[in-house]
Image (spheres, helix red, strand yellow):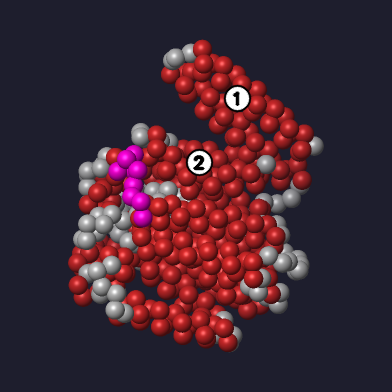
Amino acid sequence: MKLHYKYLVLLFSVLATVLATFIYVVSNSYIGYSLPFLLMGLAIGLYAIVDYRFGFYLALASGFFIFFLGRLVGQTFPSAFYIDILIWTSFLGLILDSIRRRHQIFWGNGHAISYGYFIFLLLLLIESLNPNASSFEGWFFVFRKFLQLVVIYILGLNVFTSLRRIFVFLRIWITLAFIAGVYACYQEWFGFFNFEIDWVYSVPGRAGLYFLDTGIMRKFSILSDPAAFGILMGSTAVIVFVLILQQKNLKFKTMGLLSLLFIMLGVAYSGTRTAYFTIIAGLFLYILMSINQIKTLIFSAFCFLAFVFILFGPVYGNPTVDRIRSAFNFKEDASMKVRDDNRKFIQPYILSQPLGGGLATSGMNGLNYNPNHILAGFPPDSGFLKTAIETGWIGFTLQCILYFVILVSGVRAFYASTNRIMKLILLAVTTCVFSFIVSQFGQEAIGQVPGSFLFYPCLAIIVRVRHLQTSKMIL
């Protein structure tokens, strides 16, 4: 019966496209121009309700390309609204499908990770009563965003119903990351398009953040900014590293190495120093979790030699290598000193406010929603610091406990599993999650698009793997 619904939606899409094209041709009005997109969006939304897996993967892919499309259009593009619609229509489709099939959607309802996120949701609900924040709109903006991340986690729990579907997800993600890496190489080797340059200079101060001291502009590929691009490529590189090292299939290794090459170049060209630590952290955990393997010992020796060569090798005048080296020169890092000073300055406030200053009270959100707040305009520059100043030491403690539970769950599931494929999956996603958590020290890494479509599905995989039957799979 579900298949018939799909055919009806496809037929509606075709008819809507024909009708929209006719109106577009005969009309020169704003409605004539916008109607095709409205009808196409309606058709896609309906199909996402019919097949929530389609909506999940379309939202994932859209998260990669939506910012590029916005720059290409040359105007404010409602990217967040578009992604929101896809996520919520997919969730509605999941609810309807669970009612029809009479099965639960909270496969992780007995898992500590699920409990942790529901408790954190409860804390954010309590934050609506925080007397330090005056904007209900600001609170709702942050709460809705976090609730949406939990929805992505729940969708992942239901999309990953087999090992094969988990590998499909990983393949799709690596393919999209490969495309982003290739485009970053194009930007580095051939330069930016005019519409990209116009976009960089469209906001005062943005160009200053994107240019390095050498005069080279950091690459952002098809994503929102260099920092988000670099961290995303770094976390993806960790997954690819693990899959290549643990897989025996020669074809997969060859394609994985090709993907890894462009992904690592993307990390380097992004100029995001946090991304370098992201890779180091993920590989460090990988080495610890598989230290009993000979190939891990060989790989760790290779990583050490490569790291020493990058820092002290006879390579001079290369801006990319200089940027990597600067990440480990802590004494001369002026930006790190500024961040440390900011953290020391705000520590008394954190200790005096158990629930913090309230949601959307710091940074640009603070200026937009709570302009008279003491935190308005204060740059968190860190996901951990933002949690501490907006939700207080209670929220910060809860977040640290939650991340600890996530990592312990992944490591314990890895050692408890007796299936080789399951161990490979758990090793890859746990190291990836750890790399994201480490990146929270330097950036607001968790929760951005499209990175949220990697982090939270990885959590869903950690929870979901224990429900899967062992199966023999060949990549």
Give the CA separation, mark 2 to mark 1.
23 Å
Which residue, given by chain and number where applicable, does mark 2 sit on?
A: 84
Q: How many marks?
A: 2
Q: Residue at x 27, y 65 (%)?
A: 319
Q: Residue at x 56, y 65 (%)?
A: 256
**Which image quadrant for residue 113?**
bottom right
In the rendering, at what x and y percent does residue 100 appear?
75, 42
Q: Quadrant of the N terminus?
A: top right
* Front-most of residues 160 and 60: 60
Q: In the image, which residues are magenta?
A: 189-197
Secondary structure at numbered mark 1: helix
Q: Quadrant of the C terminus?
A: bottom right
* Front-most of residues 128 and 184: 184
Q: Residue at x 59, y 54 (%)?
A: 172
* Vertical placement of residue 386 versus 309, above or below: above
Which residue, given by chain and number where applicable, does mark 1 sit on?
A: 17
Could you tell whether 241 is left or right of 463 in the image? left
Q: Residue furthest right?
A: 1
Q: Amino acid at mark 2?
A: Asp
Could you tell whether 310 is left or right of 467 in the image? left
Secondary structure at numbered mark 2: helix
**Which image quadrant for residue 435?**
bottom left
In the rendering, at what x and y percent does residue 181 appear?
45, 57
